[in-house]
Image (spheres, grey):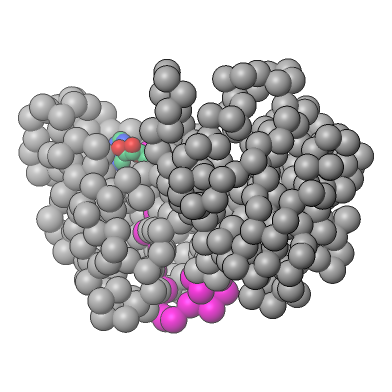
Amino acid sequence: MQTISTYDFAGKKALIRVDFNVPLNDNFEITDDTRIRAAIPTIKKIIEKGGSPIIMSHFGRPKSGPEDKFSMRHLVKHFSNLLGVDVKLAPDCIGEEVKAMAKALKPGEVLLLENLRFHKEEEKGDVEFSRQLAENGDCWVNDAFGTAHRAHASTAVMAQFFPNDKMFGYLIEGEIESLDKVLKNPTRPMTAIMGGAKVSSKITIIENMLDKVDNLIIGGGMTYTFVKANGGKIGNSICEDDYLEMALAIQKKAAEKGVKLYIATDVVAADDFSPEANTQPAPANNIPDGWQGLDAGPETIATFKNVIENSGTILWNGPVGVFEFDKFAVGSRAVAEAIAAATKKGAFSLIGGGDSVACINKFELADQVSYISTAGGALLEYLEGRVLPGVAAVLGE
Ligand code: AMP
């Protein structure tokens, strides 16, 4: 398989699928350029190796056809500044004029194609559209992990036109390498911390994790579905009654597989879902009427910490309390700190999903964990054990 390192880019036009779907304010200024910054190493490397990068991305949600609001022209200046190259903008992403612009590129020159989603064929994964996109370049580099779970023209379908000239960019390469360290070959013991509000949104991941982990910590709002399923009294705590059976099935499966399951034994109960709520400690299975569990209690935190700090590999997806309210961020902070401590001792830690990433940033521990994945849907699907079309397309699966 080709990689950015092995491929000879000299004199080649490299079509690079990136994720430049950045937020803009009302003045069309970029308010968070993380995604553009993240793509720079791949683009720079290709320039360094004598190639001409042709950048393609979706941007916003244009309804039907071109819309100035979603034009890539809003990104050109900032992108050029970050890259240190004057990026040219194509009027479209396919067609004769674009093809001619691409062809005329000299090594080191960079062309940004207009928004892929100005053509509805992009999201449909249309083969003819993919072919026209492919005509603009000599090779295809997929560096958009955030859209790797979509079988769109630019993210997967166009791979067929580059059977020997396709590869991952550094961003996807890094994501997959880190995820595989956790999912395929973890240093044991391996611990997954699954938090967040609902069992329903995490159930497939939890089931997939049962085949891989030694320890499974279930925290956050999910706790109460499990506690209720076991006959506990949960007051007003969040609960999915449709998932009580499922919770028991997970417990049974965990026991069968020898996975140690950790669920809160004590909680911080609140009289309201609010940052100013009154609180009291409560056993997880005996929460007073009218009160709801919003954070893990001290005994639970001590248990979670001990498990995490003695792990060789850690995956964290979802907070163990309502971390957005400082009063109920104690458990999530303790989890983040324990992950940092384990990482310091040599464990590999991966933080994934918007809320856990927000947590780790809030507690200023981002530089003390091994890897932070920012890919929302694609990450969740990968953790569920699904094959991502954008990954399979490069691997030739
Ligand atoms: P999810 O989107 O499913 O990962 O859920 C993340 C959200 O779960 C965060 O916004 C947390 O505030 C919330 N959450 C965590 N613990 C609880 C809880 N005990 N009760 C209600 N919501 C919670």
How many marks overall? 0
State whether residue 228 is above or below residue 305: above
* Quadrant in which the N terminus is drawn: bottom right
Across and down, in percent, residue 194 comes to: 40, 54
Q: Quadrant of residue 20?
A: top right
Q: Position of residue 318 (x, y in %)?
A: 37, 49
Residue range of the region highlighted in magenta in the rendering: 180-197
Q: Is residue 251 left or right of residue 310?
A: right
Q: Does 225 appear above or below 50?
A: above
Residue 161 position by quadrant: bottom right
Could you tell me residue 128's position as x and y percent? 91, 39
Q: Image check: 19 left or right of 320? A: right
Residue at 19% of width from left, 35% of height from top? 325
Q: Where is residue 29 in the image (x, y as percent from the top left)?
A: 42, 28
Residue closer to the observer: 219 or 360: 360
- Residue drawn 8% across the image and 30% down it: 278
Residue 60 drawn in magenta: no
Q: In the image, is 291 to the left or to the right of 170?
A: left
- Which residue is located at x 64 percent, y 58 percent? 108
Q: Is residue 258 visible?
A: yes
Q: In terms of image quarters, where does ligand 1 lie?
A: top left
Task: Between residue 169 and residue 332, name the one nearer to us.
Answer: 169
Q: Can residue 287 be seen in this view?
A: no
Check residue 189 for magenta coloring.
yes
